[in-house]
Image: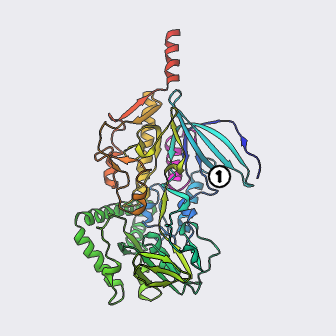
Amino acid sequence: MTAQVLEATEEFDIVIIGAGISGIGAATYFGRELPAKSLVVLEARDSIGGTWDLFRYPGIRSDSDLHTFGYEFKPWRHEAAIADAPLIREYLRETVAENDLARAIRLRHRVVEAEWSSDDARWTLTVEATDADGGTRTTTIRTRWVFAATGYYRYDQGFAPDFAGREDFQGEIVHPQHWPDSLDYAGKKVVVIGSGATAITLVPSLVSGPGAAAHVTMLQRTPTYVMALPRTDTMALRLTRLLGPRRGYAATRFKNIWIDRAVVKGLRTFPKAGRALIRHENVKRLPKHFDVDKHFNPPYDPWDQRLCLAPDGDFFASIREGTASVATGAIHRFSAEGVVLESGEEIPADVIVTATGLNMRLFDGMPIVVDGAKVDVGQSVAYRGMLLSGIPNWAMAIGYTTSSWTLKVSLICRYFIDLVRHMDRHGSDQVVPVPEDGMERRPVMDLQAGYARRAERILPQQGVTAPWRMAMAYTEDAKALRGPVADEHLHFGTSRRDASEQTGRLHHA
């Protein structure tokens, strides 16, 4: 490894942190709508794609349809509406190529600290860059704006509880976030611990195709709602044939936004009816006499946590075919031969997959310093779901948890563009939202999922009314983020240096 080198400072108008689906989308919007602004995208990993490049476990796919998960400016042309990760990675590479973004993206550039100065209204970012040969160098970048498209989980570490007896297990233990290419599970017994989207994806994938496992058991502490939906949207195909690729895509996107909204609102408004409907659909797809109420009857209402999607019912099919099963119960310990439950039952395993979730971390855990004081992001309040109190000229891209992530990112980007233009027109170079004293607050992620509850202390907060409430519906945000740019909650200003220069010019005149 070569020695660390310190490089000179560069200046940009906008720095986007992260080259995943949010960062690539933001770079496209800003490049098109703010062409006079200098822009760079800093990506810590050695390739673009974020989540869709990091996760390589079998069957990884979207949990939303690509007509809403894709960008509004780039039609999704593949027949499959629920897409596997390789198709999504190709879609992102096409977006980069079509919009000439490669020149703006710097791979292996990790932002390790961000420091704001109100004197000159600039962020100074400390960046560690790694060369292909492993050598590192440190540089600083000054920028007027930071657009943080880092997601909300740790890329280097998934969440894995400390299971007793872990060292006794004689087989392999893997976490989906770090799936080894060399893992051989062919003909073996696999236990997948967890019942979220990752587990629901893994189970049918592990028992299908060449090198399939002999049997997979999904071991869950509590059940999850699982719904089967078609992998192919036949209506989308008809609309595309009728209207052409772009208008057909727009029509499908509009259709799916409203269907999704109706489903979420309906299930939350009528939870008992929703529970009964989901149970009815599960019964139809599971073997006769299967204990549905034990394994598919969560103790919470629909959409208190995300519903899991089974494209074409593949998860249920693997159970019907006998290649997969579900076990529900608390884990006592790992043994040499598998997993022992508190009930005393032992589930044999050659491979254990801990699909136990994510470790959340906003902005890659970097220190954020404003005028010499380190900011506790957990005490900040989100404004319109994107700006943060106490942090000037900083926007974050956090998508929806109850529908397609990218839908919100598109609205955030449009508001960001409007805000920058507003500030240019009025001669402002800094803005920060300021909440009212004593305002009621609650966690920014309004879900009961374990990963959300574990992260309440480190994630921003939200209020209970607009514009401080984190809307989770596209239709609501479409109004809030396309409305007037400025209100009484936003405090605009001019850098102290610029103000003194203007005063000096007036005195000189």
Span colored in magenta: 19-39
User: Could you say which quadrant of the image residue 439 lies in?
Assistant: top left
Task: For residue 222, say whether it is visible.
Answer: yes
**How far from the left and from the top, in percent, is residue 255?**
34, 63
For residue 97: magenta?
Answer: no
Question: Which residue is at the front of the view, 81 or 468?
Answer: 468
Question: Would you say 55 lies left or right of 246 here?
Answer: right
Q: Does 253 sit above or below residue 420? A: below
Question: Would you say 90 lies left or right of 416 here?
Answer: right
Provide the residue designation for mark 1: 108
Residue at the image point whose x is 36% and y is 61% from the top:
402
User: Could you say which quadrant of the image residue 89 lies in?
Assistant: bottom right
User: Could you say which quadrant of the image residue 122 lies in?
Assistant: top right
For residue 23: magenta?
Answer: yes
Question: Which residue is at the front of the view, 293 or 242?
Answer: 293
Residue at the image point whose x is 65% and y is 36% from the top:
9
**How far from the left and from the top, in percent, is residue 82?**
45, 70
Crowding at mark 1 (Cα within 10 Å: few <14, some 14-19, many 20+): some
